[in-house]
Image (spheres, rainbow, N blue to C red):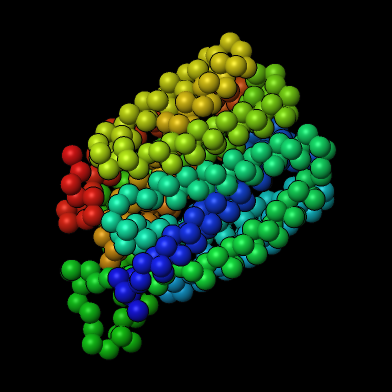
């Protein structure tokens, strides 16, 4: 059965399942991020060493994303997301226990965490694109709003855990079990993947002739597509903007703005809440004005927010900056995923390539901000984010829908 054979109730069920996949991916990311300051203190890490520890999570994601197109094409989005939910839960338990024994267990666990997250990310975006095509309207940003809802929930629970002096071990271990159970159960409602048939491909009469070599050839061809690469760089810029906020807002609020640990985590939650609002209310703007002008305006909003956050003289101004920063960063990543999946025949491969390029921001971002933070403070190191936002504005045209896609009416 193909995706186009789904009934309306099945599409609604798949939509709910995709929301849950995004929400609990967000819960996982924010639950870990909310406890970074406590893990840092327990391990006695400087900003640069913390950046290197965070690099292990990004490295796992990159390795996974390079393989994710093949994984999702072979196993399907349903099996991929379900399996990775279990693996990520195990990795989170590894972090919860391992940080008490040193840096190495944390680094290894974060690598596995990142690997699971990468394949999970591609799988749920491919399924989200299928649902978006079936519904015939922009909904991908709302799926990513689900991710942001999960991050807000995870951040608030993390703030409460810090305030109540709940241990990192108890907090993360319980969260890991909940995530694994919910994801495994929810993906049962995913619809079948619609791989389609590329117009320029010759499909052999014998499916066995579609060998591993031919699939690899298609994957390598995707890496040579100019639009796909430009969309990937566009996503990289927004991923760096988003990732810098997730990884460093709570730390920089504590270290540079003199906030308490609870207030630092609250600023992190404000950033995430703003991203959630942008993603939830953004689709009507995309439908009305088109992808390109909307993402360019939001990139400018994020630049203003960064200026408030970096140059603000006090904590309230920094909170306003965090809010605008998050709002402006909200739509870049989901719009890039929709652009990568415009052609269903190539959706898995292109989403994998774009996500791989985008996640390079998570690979290089933490150590870059950490290295600069050792010299100019983490807060001032965030100027690097502004540079990439300017790049995203210049590359905004790359996400214009392909001719013949559902959003081809783009202005």
| Total marks placed | 0
Q: Is residue 391 visible?
A: no
Q: Residue at x 57, y 19 (%)?
A: 318
Q: Residue at x 30, y 70 (%)?
A: 4
Dividing the picture into quadrants, the one containing residue 87 is bottom right
**Left-right relation of 366 to 137:** right
Q: Is residue 3 above or below residue 281?
A: below
- Direction front: furthest residue: 9
**Observer-nearest of 131 and 218:** 131
Residue 182 placement (x, y as % from top left): 62, 62
Q: Is residue 319 above or below residue 407?
A: above
Q: Is residue 96 above or below residue 323?
A: below
Q: Residue at x 33, y 29 (%)?
A: 297
Q: Residue at x 54, y 32 (%)?
A: 271
- Direction top: furthest residue: 313
Dividing the picture into quadrants, the one containing residue 47 is top right
Dividing the picture into quadrants, the one containing residue 235 is top left
**Left-right relation of 44 to 28:** right
Q: Which quadrant would the N terminus be assigned to in this image?
A: bottom left
**Left-right relation of 75 to 233:** right
Residue 102 placement (x, y as % from top left): 79, 48
Residue 384 placement (x, y as % from top left): 47, 28
Q: Is residue 131 visible?
A: yes
Residue 192 placement (x, y as % from top left): 40, 72
**Observer-nearest of 16 and 210:** 16
Q: Which quadrant would the C terminus be assigned to in this image?
A: top left
**Observer-nearest of 312 and 215:** 312
């Amino acid at each position: 059965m193909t995706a186009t054979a789904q009934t309306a109730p099945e599409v609604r069920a798949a939509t709910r399942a995709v929301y849950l996949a995004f929400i609990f991916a967000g819960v996982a990311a924010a639950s870990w991020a909310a406890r970074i300051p406590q893990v840092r203190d327990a391990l006695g890490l400087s900003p640069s060493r913390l950046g290197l520890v965070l690099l292990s999570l990004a490295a796992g994601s990159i390795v996974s994303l390079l393989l994710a197109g093949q994984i999702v094409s072979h196993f399907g989005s349903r099996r991929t997301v379900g399996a990775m939910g279990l693996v990520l839960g195990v990795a989170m338990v590894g972090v919860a226990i391992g940080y008490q024994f040193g840096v190495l267990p944390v680094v290894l666990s974060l690598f596995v965490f990142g690997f699971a997250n990468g394949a999970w990310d591609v799988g749920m975006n491919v399924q989200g694109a299928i649902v978006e095509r079936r519904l015939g309207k922009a909904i991908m940003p709302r799926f990513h709003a689900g991710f942001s809802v999960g991050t807000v929930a995870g951040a608030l629970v993390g703030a409460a855990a810090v305030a109540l002096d709940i241990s990192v071990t108890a907090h993360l271990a319980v969260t890991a079990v909940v995530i694994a159970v919910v994801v495994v159960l929810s993906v049962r409602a995913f619809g079948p993947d619609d791989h389609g048939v590329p117009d320029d491909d010759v499909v052999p009469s014998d499916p066995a002739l579609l060998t591993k070599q031919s699939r690899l050839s298609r994957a390598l061809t995707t890496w040579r597509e100019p639009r796909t690469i430009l969309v990937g760089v566009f996503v990289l810029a927004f991923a760096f903007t988003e990732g810098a906020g997730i990884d460093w807002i709570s730390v920089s609020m504590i270290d540079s703005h003199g906030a308490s640990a609870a207030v630092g985590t609250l600023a992190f939650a404000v950033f995430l809440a703003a991203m959630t609002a942008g993603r939830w209310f953004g689709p009507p703007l995309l439908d009305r004005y088109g992808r390109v002008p909307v993402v360019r305006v939001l990139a400018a909003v994020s630049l203003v927010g960064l200026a408030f956050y970096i140059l603000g003289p006090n904590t309230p101004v920094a909170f306003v900056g965090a809010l605008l920063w998050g709002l402006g960063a909200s739509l870049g990543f989901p719009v890039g995923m929709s652009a990568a999946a415009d052609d269903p025949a190539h959706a898995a491969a292109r989403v994998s390539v774009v996500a791989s390029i985008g996640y390079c921001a998570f690979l290089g971002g933490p150590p870059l901000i950490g290295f600069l933070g050792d010299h100019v403070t983490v807060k001032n190191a965030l100027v690097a984010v502004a540079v990439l936002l300017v790049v995203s504005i210049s590359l905004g045209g790359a996400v214009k829908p392909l001719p013949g896609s559902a959003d081809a009416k783009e202005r």
